[in-house]
Image (cartoon, rainbow, N blue to C red):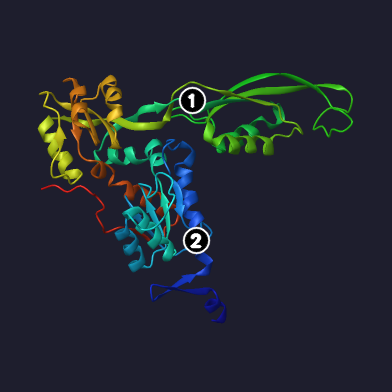
Amino acid sequence: MIKSLLKLIIFPISNNLFVINSDKMIKIKDIINELEQFAPLSVQEDYDNAGLIIGNKEEICNAALLTIDTTEEIVDEAINKGINLIISHHPIIFSGLKKITGKNYIEKTIIKAIKHDIAIYAAHTNFDSVISGVNAKISEKLKLTSCKVLQPEKNILKKLVTFIPNSHVEIVRQSVFNAGAGHIGNYDSCSYNLIGKGSFRASDKANPFVGEIGKIHFEEETRFETIFPKYLQSSIIKALIENHPYEEVAYDIYPLDNEFNQLGMGMIGELLTETDEEQFLSQLKEIFQVPVIRHTQFLNKKIKKVALCGGAGSTLLKDAIRNGADIFISGDFKYHQFFDAEKKILIADIGHFESEQYTKELFYDILTKKFPNFAFHFSEINTNPISYF
């Protein structure tokens, strides 16, 4: 009985007592690590500010609030519910702040969060970019099939070439694959292997795996080649070196200009059954709870291939047209940008917030797989700054 009582830690929060089992305590960094394993910060856009914005990642997390935006109302909701971590899609801070005096909603939100020891984390364009991210969730809601990235990233891929003694090929190869290398489309464990003969001579300061000091040695080796996204380079090289038997591991890394179809903006897929334009827009209004959709004129053709981008995606319109989409769904289209459809495609602007609203579900899906018994709360506040009359 005494042992079990010692395992209970009581945290006073908002004049309430929350009892947490110390055997199952989760730190803020544990939750962050899970989000960043899904969508690394290194893949966010240059202008973005995703990541931990306020707070100490070493603090114990008692619960997390999932939201699209962080506002003062959201912080109040976290305070009232005894929550010390807010996970938001949009960052509360985009650019640097020189003063924090409470003169606007951003500064007021920051001050209140700091006063109440509430951490704020943003998962923004990194979650937009990964193939299973925000746009995949939108595609899921539309029940699209055969989905692929609409605008794949370039200059992301690298090629690793290394030379492995034949006795250790399988061990090294598998360790590199486990670290994230070797993915091409729907295939994994992709590599090229060529058997040859390597040579080397160990100096008197060496400790060779094979061969003798001072003598040239020839070893049957396999030239192993595979590709990987550059943001995984450190973990892949670490796996290579830790599992390779040689004292000095020879390897080359080459940058590639290939498109990386696992990363990029937007998504395109197909409906199970082609649908009339008006009927499809009615379905859009229902699925995304939109009172009105801004759209170009109907083209009097069926909707089958659907392109989309959560948030502001007007820059992807040409990609949607080039890929033969019948409709492009996004938000924040300006007046003159609707002309760019040129009667080749139907544009449907459903709103920025509306298109990304299910990102909260994505957060929940990812985190509850790792922490099934942890308290993740959906915010009950609609942070959409746009209203319709």
172 vs 112, nearest the viewer:
112
- Percent across and percent down for residue 146 are 31, 30
Label of residue 155 in the image: 1
- Percent across and percent down for residue 67 are 33, 53
- Percent across and percent down for residue 270 are 25, 29
- Percent across and percent down for residue 375 are 39, 62
Q: Is residue 184 visible?
A: yes
Which amino acid is tagged 2? Ile
Q: Residue at x 28, y 19 (%)?
A: 322
Residue 18, by quadrant, is bottom left
Q: Quadrant of the N terminus?
A: bottom right
User: Relative to 296, does residue 76 appear above or below in the rendering?
Assistant: below
245 vs 102, nearest the viewer:
102
User: Relative to 128, does residue 374 appear above or below in the rendering?
Assistant: below
Label 2 crowd bin: few (<14), some (14–19), many (20+), radius 10 Å: some
25 vs 389, nearest the viewer:
389
Q: Is residue 131 visible?
A: no
Which amino acid is tagged 1? Asn
Mark 2–mark 1 CB contact (< 8 Å): no
User: Relative to 8, does residue 148 appear above or below in the rendering?
Assistant: above
Label of residue 26 in the image: 2
Along the horizontal axis of the image, is 181 left or right of 365? right
Which type of secondary structure does the marked residue at label 1 adopt? loop
Label 1 crowd bin: few (<14), some (14–19), many (20+), radius 10 Å: few
Q: Nearer the viewer, mark 2 or mark 1?
A: 1
Mark nearer the N terminus (2 vs 1): 2
Residue 143, by quadrant, is top left
Q: How many marks?
A: 2
Label of residue 260 in the image: none
Tell me the distance, in whole angstroms, between the alpha carbons under discs 2 and 1.
37 Å
Q: Residue at x 44, y 46 (%)?
A: 96
